Amino acid sequence: MLLLNLPNFEVKIVIKEGKRLIFDSIRKKYVALTPEEWVRQHFVHWLVAEKGYPVSLMANEVQIQLNAMRKRCDTVLYDRSLRARMIVEYKAPDVEITQQVFDQISRYNIVLKVEYLVVSNGLHHYCCRVDYDQGTYQFLPEIPDYNRL
C-alpha cells in the first residue's frame, strides 16, 4: 500500500479467501483492505497514539439517517458524556480533497452537530471548528489533542 503522511505502526493484515483484510482496532475485527481503509487505520492509530484520543470513545462506520437516506460517517469521536464531538471523513490517497468532500461531511453534521470536522486522504489532513453561535467555521492549523477539545 501507499506510504502516507502519517506515522507507521504495526499493521495486522491477513489474507482470507484470496482477499486482504486489515485489523480495525475500533471495531475489533478484520475488514477489507481498501485504500480508504488503509488511510482510516493509519489515521485512527495516529489519533490514539499521538493525540491521546481514547479508542473507547471512537466509532467507525456510524450510521445516521439524513432525510430519508441512510449514510455512514467514517469515524465519529465522542466526549466522555458520549456526545458526538468530531466527524472524520477519509478518502483514498489518490482522491483529491475538494469542496465536495467538505460538503459531504457537512451534510453528515446536519444530523450530529459536532464541533470539529476532519477530512484526510492520508497525505493531506484538514480540520475545521464549527462555531454555531456565529454560524461560521474556522480551519485549524492542526488537529487538536483530545484533552484540548
Image (cartoon, rainbow, N blue to C red):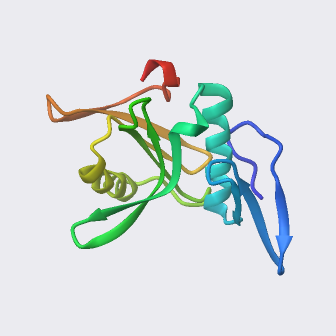
Residue at 15% across / 35% down in the picture? Answer: 135
Residue at 57% across / 31% down in the picture? Answer: 53
State the image coordinates of residue 45 (x, y, percent, origin top left): 67, 39
State the image coordinates of residue 5 (x, y, percent, origin top left): 67, 40
State the image coordinates of residue 11 (x, y, percent, origin top left): 81, 49
Q: Residue at the top extreme?
A: 148
State the image coordinates of residue 130 (x, y, percent, origin top left): 28, 34
Q: Quadrant of the N terminus?
A: bottom right
**Residue 117 seen anywhere in this rendered image of the structure:** no
Residues 77 and 126: in front is 77
From the viewer's perspective, is residue 79 above or below residue 43? above
Residue at 54% across / 57% down in the picture? Answer: 91
User: Relative to 90, is 98 on the left or the right?
Assistant: left
Q: Residue at the bottom extreme?
A: 17
User: Relative to 86, is 65 on the left or the right?
Assistant: left
User: Relative to 17, is 103 on the left or the right?
Assistant: left
Residues 43 and 53: in front is 53
**Residue 76 seen anywhere in this rendered image of the structure:** yes
Q: Quadrant of the C terminus?
A: top left
* Number of numbered labels in the structure image: 0
Q: Residue at the front extreme?
A: 81
